[in-house]
Amino acid sequence: MRKRTFKFGMLALVALALTYCQREDASEAPQQDPVPTVDPQAVVSLNEAKSLFEASENQKRTANSVSRRKYPFIELETDWRYFVQTQTLVGDAYSKIPVTIVGSDLSAEILFLKKDGITEQTLFVTKVNSLTSDNRIVNADFYLFTPKGKFISAYRMKEGGITHELVPKYKGRYRLVVDTEAAQAGRKGDGHHHFAIRCECETEYGEGDCDCANSDGGGLGSDDNPIPLEEVTVYGKRKKRINNSYTPYPSYTPYTPNNNGFPDPDSKENHHSYTGGGSYKGGSSSVGAGLMRSDGTKVEEKVDDDLTNPCAKAVLEQAKTLNSEISNILGMFGSDDNYNIRIHNKSFAMDSEHKGDVAYTIPKGSISGNVHTLDCDIYLNDDIISSASQEYILATIYHEVIHSYLIYELQTLGEKAFNRKYPSVYSKEFFVGNRKQKKMYVLIDDKQHHNKFSNFIESLAQSIMSFPGTQISLETARAMAKVGVVENESLSERENYLNNQQKLGKSGIPCKP
């Protein structure tokens, strides 16, 4: 079994632990988790936001009253009881308010952010495709617009991490609009709302400079003639990433007429598609401020190491770049100065406490006011990894990264919320073999949170399968993902055999001298 050591330095949160590891009703205001205290000089106040918002809406109403546009400027409605002042995980203060786009029944958010002393407001739309059972986003598209609906930018999230920017295929001006004629005739029979992103060529564009004029319109919220948006990789090979201030699988609050901003989870599945009760209505996510703050800028993604084992060092570089959930989690540590992972290798031969272990991690966390810091040092056993396959080294690193992420979640959420989000699981069915067959396993009950690993096992297996050049079977990857998480008695002889073949380097990609 893999073993692990956790040494918590978290102030007033967790006592020192040393263990081992082997791998609604509208009349009420919404009930929310406590909002962190923010600097009043850095965040937009209620009065300032209200004044800015109402001035913008009055201006649009005046323009719409005299305009002959087929599609007038979108108009927004809100309830200021839901105004929130908060901050991102990296401490950027911002304010937000849920809004409804008049005539469309689409809910979105207005984000208020100060830049160089100037307050900007941005319309932020979250279009969710799938959620976890506790309403955290798995796959979604995010759109930023001006309050008038002018398209600014869009991003795509896959497996809990921003992977692509969505860029219009044709040059031109695009605007979020409401089809008022369709709205007056009643909602479409297919359940879609009457809004879309349309090409809008103004006189300011010179001839030949507005290619979207001859392209199809449509887009967000409409399957009829969608706006041609092309995926442009944000991460590349994850060498760099947008300076997002959100964790993988960010939270999502669907807004419906019945809950007015209250969470409305509607599924017990691990991952489920989100339909908003039959049609997309939008809602709130914790991603917008990070995207708005970034302006498309990139920051270096860095995971420190002092690895002297060249094979382990090469595998770590691959681990940072894979398109997988665990890689996204690793990237969170690599892009935030407050949360860091450093990976080491050494012989455990003279270490009586860890001799025979594959890896262990020492976390050191602290809380000062609203600022959380966490440094996790991961140690790999040179005596084992020197002869192991590259897939085995990857699985070991990712296993420890999951531990580090759970420690991060414990520190930032607090013990009560952490246990609610990650309930301890005694036994659970997991996939076995190459297909959809399942088998019941008993999880290891220890202080390292192995009994909270249940939602990560299949993700870990899929992450192993994503390793470039690997030819191992899904059955092998699933066996490797379970070892060190479930009790050894739950593993079959074949599962232990498949894992040991990787551990001994007899299968998988060998490490070159």
Image (tube, grey):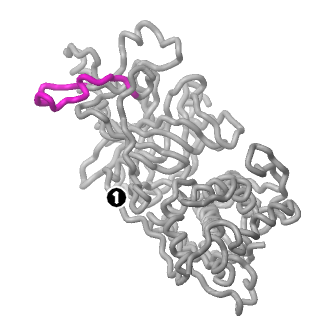
Q: Give yes or no for residue 206 being in the magenta stretch.
A: yes
Residues 108 and 21: in front is 21
**At numbered mark 1, what does the secondary structure look like: helix, strand or loop?**
strand
Q: In which quarter of the image is the C terminus?
A: bottom right
Image coordinates of residue 38 in percent, x first then y, are 42, 56
Q: In this view, does 394 lie to the left or right of 42?
A: right
> Residue at left 59%, top 64%?
408
- Residue 175 position (above or below residue 333): above
* Furthest residue toward bottom: 350
- Residue drawn at 36 percent across, 62 percent down: 299
Highlighted range, magenta: 200-219
Task: Please tell me which residue lies in front, 119 or 132.
Answer: 132
- Give the residue at the far top of this rendering: 185
Q: The residue under label 1 is which amino acid type?
A: Lys
Residue 87, given in percent of the width and then of the height, sits at 44, 54
Image height check: is 153 above or below 114? above
Q: Is residue 87 above or below residue 171?
A: below
The answer to whether residue 433 is seen in the rendering is yes
Q: Which residue position holds label 1? A: 298
In the image, residue 95 lies at what x, y percent? 40, 46
Q: Is residue 53 above or below residue 238?
A: above
* Front residue of this view, candidates 329 and 89: 329
Which of the 4 quarters of the picture holds residue 132?
top right
Main secondary structure type of the part rendered in magenta: loop
Q: Can residue 369 be seen from the camera position used here?
A: no
Quadrant of res 269? top right
